[in-house]
Amino acid sequence: MPIAAAAASPLLEWRDPVYILAGFAGIIALGLMLVQPLLIAGYLPGLSAYRGRRVHLWTGGALVVAVVIHVGGLWITSPPDMIDALLFSSPTPFSPWGVIAMWAIFAVAVFAALRRRLGVRPRTWRIAHTLLAIVIVVGSVVHGILIEGTMETVSKAVLCALVLAATIKVMTDLQVWRKRAKLREESIARR
Amino acid sequence: MTSVIINRRNLLAAGGAVLAAGVSGLVVPARAQGLVPTPSMSGGSNNYRAGAPTVGRIGKGGFWMSGTVRRAGDGAPLAGQRIQIWAHTTEGREHDPQSHGATLTDKNGAFRLEMPQIIPVFGQPHGHLAYDSGEFKTVFLRPVMRSAKDTSLEAHFVLQPA
């Protein structure tokens, strides 16, 4: 829906294909951010929490690719504006939010790839991922809301609200801050 | 002898005047030394092209960029100053040569150049202006439109000697 609404934007008429691609990669990234928590909690129909976790890894990878296309495309469109944003010296208030979210996304991806090799304890990983996920979601939502671009206002606000709601719901449902052993005891007791 | 009558109306007016003076004092702290030079805005020089031609109009027009150029200190209007203007418009991107043009200030230090409609780019509808003729210090401005539907935009320069 938000993509269809953005595809109808009159602004597209005056934009390059690369700029359009970069913008839509950003919208897709925001959409993936809605799917991510739902996958990990197994809330998507047809995908158990176990299958969901596998898919979560792939959509996480897709999110990294979408962000790289977003930033790369904007760099090609206007290098000085992108450099300003990356150096936190941009006049636009939404830029730092997006850049912080980008680094948090990259951090999660690198951490996810290396955590077994580094021997990171599951609980440490879970807390780190949760904190970074909060940074990613808040950063991306503020970034999106403050931008005046091709996204249609209502569909953008709805998507942002859904991303926030899904994140909060899944984090409270999974009680990510609790010790895993305790959860295991409870699930055994329930059986 | 003049009598001072204090009623509610002139009390309010006096209070408002004091408030206004206080606020403007905050905005322009160096008032005592005269008009303060305008600093360059961040991102103002992005996609700048040196030596844009002086034109009667950029492209087909329909949008007005206007402003004033004054001297720091005494605020005297500066006539004949060259101001360069560029933006992402319906007719071209910021870095396209046809999106750039320059105009001169009149005897009152005012300038006004017609250009194509500015549209939002990089998340904000904004224009770029530059003073870079050398007599005064170079200044780059990047004003943002209140609404993308606006058909005009203003920017004001206060220049200091180079």
Image (cartoon, coloured by chain):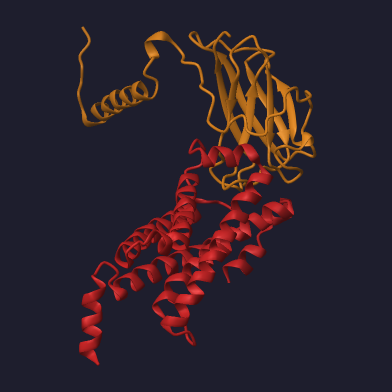
Tell how many labels: 0
Dividing the picture into quarters, in which one does residue A173 lie?
A: bottom left
Q: Could you tell me residue B59's position as x and y percent?
A: 79, 37
In the displayed structure image, the side of residue A69 where residue A92 appears, left or right: left
Query: Residue, x 20% and y 88% (percent of image)?
Result: A189
Q: Which chain is red in the picture?
A: A
For the residue pair A64 and B68, the one nearer the viewer reads as: A64
For the residue pair B154 and A187, the one nearer the viewer reads as: A187
Q: Which chain is orange in the picture?
A: B
Q: Could you tell me residue B46's position as x and y percent?
A: 63, 33
Q: Could you tell me residue A62's position as x and y percent?
A: 57, 65
Q: Could you tell me residue B107's position as x and y percent?
A: 66, 13
Query: Residue, x 48% and y 9% (percent of image)?
Result: B73
In the displayed structure image, the side of residue A112 where residue A182 appears, left or right: left
Q: Is residue B75 visible?
A: yes
For the residue pair A189 and B132, the one nearer the viewer reads as: A189
* A41 versus B102 height, above or below: below
